[in-house]
Image: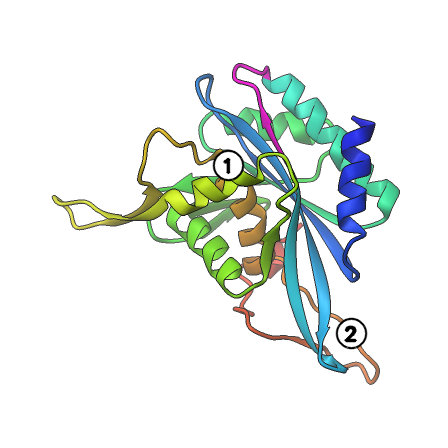
Amino acid sequence: MRNDIAEVEALINKQKGAEALFYGLDIGRVQDYSTLSISVRYILPIGTTINSLLSKYYCVYLKRYPLQTPYEVIEDDCAMWWKWADEINLTRHFVADMTGVGAPVVEGLKKRGVRCTGVVITGGHQESNPAIGEYHVPKATLATQLVRTAQMGRFQIYKSMQFAAEFKEELGNFGYDQNKMTGAISYEALDERIHDDLVISVALPVWFGERVMQHEIKIKGGTTATVEDRDYNPLYPENGN
């Protein structure tokens, strides 16, 4: 475990301007993988002025748990990574899939001291915030936000990381599919043989960072610096953790 922590810290320190850690947990059923991701958001100046900023996400850790790993083991591992953030003094946000079997896992994380936001992944088209710390988000929205952020050059994953190649394969396998009967469009993994746990575990915190917990920085004179090339419209900022 200490080797994993050392590797993650080395990747974080490759870039300057680390502002926050974003954890993402996709909870799988017995026959599916569960995956934990850790991404770092960096705030970088554009050009020579601090009044113009760019936020960028780097995925620094991916862990796909073996099939049939007890949820209690996953909860303990996530709690360890959550507490580790105290050592590096960064703001942290934990976003977990609470669809189906994910709901009791979210509760287990909270009992272990993890300040966790739960996301119910839906098949609809609308995002909602039915309770503090709980969001309902279509899978298409999660995938689209991740792809859009990556296309803008604001999300990267280190090639040297474990599961990095599998992540890229999963992401490349996502595409739009239209139901012939209803006409509804969904954004799914087109090849059912390929899992989507890695993509979802990363998409959850990127969505949260972009839609709920945008970055603001106060500068001299009491004004707020702007962040370019992004949707700067918080979904429900008053309910962010």
* Residue under the point 77% across and 29% down: 80
Distance, label 1 to label 2, CA atoms, is: 39 Å
The one nearer the camera, 145 or 173, is 173
Magenta residues, as a range? Answer: 62-70
The image shows residue 228 at horizontal and vertical percentages of: 60, 75
64 falls in the magenta region: yes
Total numbered badges shown on the rendered structure? 2
The structure residue drawn at horizontal position 49% and vertical position 62%, both measured from the top left corner, is 151
Of the numbered discs 1 and 2, the one sitting upstream in the chain is 1
At which x and y percent is residue 156? Answer: 60, 54
- In the depicted structure, whether residue 111 falls above or below residue 49: above
Side of 180 relative to 156 (left or right): left
> Which residue reaches farthest front?
160
Residue 19 visible to the viewer: yes
In the displayed orientation, state which residue is furthest to the bottom.
221
Q: How crowded is mark 1: few (under 14 residues within 10 Å), some or many (20 or more)?
A: some
Q: Quadrant of residue 69?
A: top right
- The kind of residue on which mark 2 rests is Lys
Question: Residue 125: where, in percent of width, then height?
Answer: 34, 52
96 falls in the magenta region: no
Query: Mark 2 falls on what kind of element?
Result: loop
Q: Residue at coordinates 59% horizontally, 48% vertically from top-left?
A: 205
Quarter of the view holding residue 62: top right
Q: In this view, does 215 lie above or below 196?
A: below
- Please report the residue visible at 75 percent of the width from the left and 34 percent of the height from the top: 81
- Return the residue at label 2: 218
Report whether residue 113 is seen: no
In front here: 228 or 161?
Answer: 161
Quadrant hosting residue 100:
top left
Provide the residue designation for mark 1.
Answer: 166
- The N terminus, quarter of image: top right
Q: Which amino acid lies under the numbered mark 1 shown in the image of this protein?
A: Glu
